Amino acid sequence: MVEEASIKQVILKDYVKGFAKESDLILKNSIVKLKIPNQCSNDAVLVKNLYLSCDPYMRGRMAKTDRISTCLIPYGKLTVITKNVEFLKHEGPNVFFVNMTITGYGVAKIVDSSNPDFKKGDLIWGLTGWEEYSLIKSTQGLFKIQNADLPLSYYTGILGMPGHTAYIGFYEICSPKKGEYVFVSAASGAVGQFAKLFGCYVVGSAGSKDKKELMFRVALIRLKEEKFNGRIAVCGMISQYNLEDPDEGTRNLLCLVTKRIRMEGFLVFDYYNLYPKFLEMMVPLVKQGKITYIEDVAQGLENAPNALVGLFSGRNVGKQVVVVARE
Ligand SMILES: NC(=O)c1ccc[n+]([C@@H]2O[C@H](COP(=O)([O-])OP(=O)(O)OC[C@H]3O[C@@H](n4cnc5c(N)ncnc54)[C@H](OP(=O)(O)O)[C@@H]3O)[C@@H](O)[C@H]2O)c1
């Protein structure tokens, strides 16, 4: 007989307008079978979720698709212009659905598989459900974890999608040169540390005293000289995600012309082909303690809604992660 389990799931109560609140998400119990149903394709996996990542883009998915959420959802209508369409097709819904389990990046262990490349016991990171067990209908977009000697939760952050974003923004989009000046907003994370290790002079901004202390590797300098040929990598606009009418325009755009500046937006999943290269650099840096990484840990799915909405006021100090199960 197929084993069953009673599981907790985080459900979207209703589409969100304005600032997301903890009460926009509710906890539900369901009974699920711990086996892949026969009707699933030969590329499905059933996983036990271990760690879930709270990410700012999730706010876009909580909204009903309209003008605002369309430009906020990385996986929304914009996908038609991305290079990696095959991958995106398997990314799941562009928005969360009311009364259904929300999805996000997480680390999980495979408990059943219909794909011989993903075996029972393998550890993966990728898009999964905010629930204790998830049936993932396609393995496309899942990454097998090879360096399981590092804390697994790191694959929600420094070794996963957010860390890879920092790497791409800095190395691929900004094409840094040693000795250049780098400004990093929300600088308590990885980018400032990459820039410092690379030999750049780094200026950072952070929203609280605690976070400023995390920037200890970042030199605070004054930019006196006028700089030309700057590059701006734009990965997000968190301050806009909860605004119903984000009408603030950017001023001084003429400076892009006079200072010969290049400004470029990017989406990390267009660069997942570089993920092995990123890991090759990052894993030794983490193992040697050359990158300082801090997590803000919420224990259990019951604390997940509160952890997620806390992102939008900058309450988290370090990567916000939810522990569903440690093994
Ligand atoms: N393009 C992509 O593919 C991609 C991938 C991943 C992430 N992103 C984007 O990158 C940005 C950072 O993501 P992350 O993973 O580093 O998130 P994170 O760890 O949650 O950090 C976000 C930081 O933003 C600041 N913040 C929060 N609310 C704010 C507000 N209302 N106004 C101004 N600052 C606020 C906070 O720093 P302070 O308190 O120090 O201000 C917070 O620590 C987000 O905009 C996200 O959407 C883009």
Image (tube, rainbow, N blue to C red):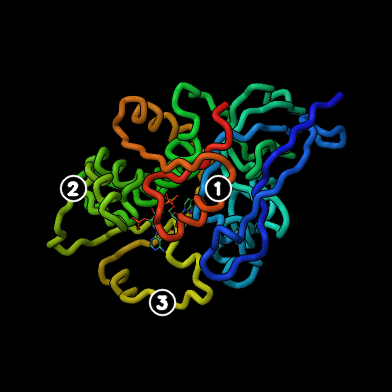
- x%, y% of residue 223? 16, 60
Would you name the residue on which mark 1 appears? 304
Secondary element type, mark 2: loop
| Image quadrant where one finds the N terminus | top right
* Closer-to-camera residue (132/219): 132
**Residue 15 seen from this side:** yes
Q: Earlier in the sequence, mark 3 or mark 1?
A: 3
Viewer-nearest of discs 3 and 1: 1
- Left or right of 221? Residue 148 is right
Would you name the residue on which mark 3 appears? 249
- Left or right of 204? Residue 109 is right
Q: Residue at x 45, y 41 (%)?
A: 297
Is the distance from the Cβ of mark 2 to the nearest ligand 1 atom less than 8 Å?
A: no
Viewer-nearest of discs 2 and 1: 1
Tell me which corner region of the image, top left, top right, bottom left or bottom right, holds residue 158: top left
Looking at the rendered structure, the kind of residue marked 1 is Ala
- x%, y% of residue 305? 56, 52
Q: Earlier in the sequence, mark 2 or mark 1?
A: 2
Q: Residue at x 75, y 43 (%)?
A: 30
Looking at the rendered structure, the kind of residue marked 3 is Gly
Q: Earlier in the sequence, mark 2 or mark 3?
A: 2
**Residue 274 seen from this side:** no
* Closer-to-camera residue (184/1): 1
Q: Which mark is residue 219?
A: 2
- Left or right of 7? Residue 187 is left
Distance (Cα) linking label 3 and label 1:
33 Å
Secondary element type, mark 1: helix
Looking at the rendered structure, the kind of residue marked 2 is Ala
Q: Residue at x 63, y 71 (%)?
A: 66
Rate crowding at label 3 as few (under 14), some (14 to 19) or many (20 or more) other CA atoms within 10 Å: few
